[in-house]
Image (cartoon, helix red, strand yellow):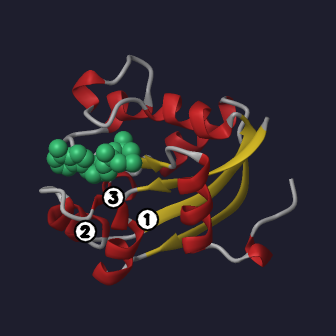
Amino acid sequence: MKEKTLSIIKPDGVARHVIGEVIRRIEEAGLNIVAMKMIKMAPAEAKGFYKVHEGKPFLESLIDFMSSGPCVVMVLEGDNAIKKYRKLMGATDYTKAEEGTIRRAFATDIEKNVVHGSDSESSADFEINYFFSELEIVAG
Ligand code: ADP
Ligand code: MG
């Protein structure tokens, strides 16, 4: 089933110059990039994006981190894009991520784990609309 998912290359990934490497892996996996831009979030914007994590002990630090520098946000499209991209990213904790995944290769910390990917159809809908208008997404 053709799906769309939201991908973010987080500030650590941008600062460590792995934008190209992440995009290479996305393309190699057969996912199409149908929208892309670079943004620097204000803390309030990061907070709104991560509202599902309200009350979690790591939220405040996560907001600081996500608003600390530029991110690359993309909409990816393809068959089973949500699961496919989650698999490409690897587990949240990079020490538990499978060999060959983006997080295993590049993450340095459970928080600074290089990439974000939507975890369900409903979160993909919310997250894509959070950053992109319909006009910014090309027809796949
Ligand atoms: P994922 O990004 O794999 O979907 P979550 O949605 O659970 O993971 O968490 C969102 C982000 O919050 C993670 O990618 C990571 O940057 C950070 N995070 C999650 N759990 C922790 C934790 N225990 N300590 C610090 N940061 C965390
Ligand atoms: Mg998540």
Q: Which residue is mark 3?
A: 15
Q: Residue furthest right?
A: 139
**Residue 92 place in picture, x, y as percent:** 31, 37
Using the rendered view, name the quadrant where residue 24 is placed: top right
Between residues 5 and 23, which one lies in front from this camera angle? 5
**Residue 95 place in picture, x, y as percent:** 22, 25
**Residue 94 place in picture, x, y as percent:** 27, 31
Q: Which residue is mark 2?
A: 63
State yes or no: discs 1 and 2 in contact (Cβ < 8 Å).
no
Q: CA distance from mark 1 to mark 2?
A: 13 Å
Query: Element type at marker 1?
Result: strand
Image-based side of 9 in relation to 93, left or right: right
Lower sequence index among marks 3 and 1: 3
Using the rendered view, name the quadrant where residue 14 is placed: bottom left
Give neighbour class at mark 3: few <14, some 14-19, many 20+ (Cα, 10 Å): some
Q: Residue furthest top?
A: 99
